[in-house]
Image (cartoon, rainbow, N blue to C red):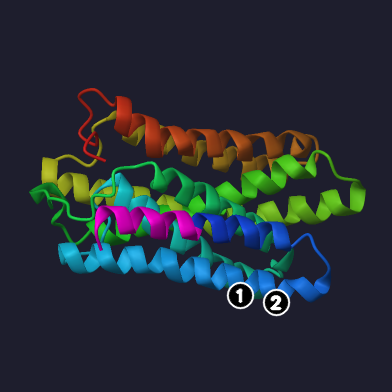
Amino acid sequence: MTGTLLRFVCLGAAILYYVAFATTYLNKKYQKLSLILWCIGIALNGAIVINNWIVNGYMPFVSMYQVLTFLGVTFAMVYVYIRYMHNGLFMKRYFMVSQGVIMTGVFFMAQAAEWHFPPALQSAFFIPHVFSYMISYCLVAVASILTVISFFLKKEQHALYEKGAYNLVLTGFPFMVLGMFLGSLWANECWGNYWQWDNKEVWSLVTVLALTVYLHFRRHARLKKFAPYFVVLAFVFEIITLFFVGMFGGDSMHAYN
């Protein structure tokens, strides 16, 4: 696909995600339409991923453009698990709108499907490291949305959303820790050291620690009321790790992201 066509496909996916999200608030008879629109949006999103994969000949995880495009599809994959393992049907609309936000961001990026594959990324740890973080980022993002919304809900709904956020974090936390572990193995392979206190490494650790505090506080009767704030903080740290370190990383070894 040309850059212009990729941009239009990206815009189409974003619009379909938003419309599918809005349709979930209509009568039940429109829910099938919402699902159809969502599936078409995922198909368009997936078409960009496949194009990037074919053009480059490797898993499209190298540039931020490639990562975010794949992240859009990852939200849908993660939702399928949450839907059936944690009764997460009510979370569907928040996965949809998250995908819309991601693809809106991708729309404004340079549609450069072809990308140089740096030697540092040519490692067996590369794909599982990035994919583990993608899964955890999706789950923490939606968990933070549920948490913020829960602040404004009445008791019964509040409990539902709080429990939903907890299930998402429980599912995502191991993937985030796994991503960090694989990253340390990769760092040792490339740079001869498991941990360099690099900007991105530090912010990744801060994110994990925020979720650790959340999980501990939630099991403590007197501290439980403070726990939700750490989910929101973890999401803020996640954004810093994913975007701002890459853009303003200075001499960071991860600045190529």
Left or right for 177, reference 37: left
Q: How many marks?
A: 2
- The reply to whether the magenta stretch includes residue 120 is no
Q: Which residue does the numbered mark 2 point to in the structure image?
A: 32
Identify the amino acid type marked 1: Ile
* Quadrant where the image shows the N terminus: bottom left
The image shows residue 162, relative to residue 251, as above or below, that is: below
Left or right for 236, reference 44: right
Please indicate, yes or no, whether residue 103 appears anywhere in the rendered image: yes
Q: Which residue does the numbered mark 1 point to in the structure image?
A: 36
Please indicate, yes or no, whether residue 85 appears anywhere in the rendered image: no
Name the residue rendered at 61%, 51% in the picture.
142
The image quadrant of residue 27 is bottom right
Magenta region, residue range: 1-13
Identify the amino acid type marked 2: Lys
* Quadrant where the image shows the C terminus: top left
| Foreground pick, 221 / 117 | 117
| Foreground pick, 59 / 203 | 59
State the image coordinates of residue 26 (x, y, percent, origin top left): 80, 63
Q: Residues within 10 Å of mark 1 (few under 14, many from 20)?
A: some
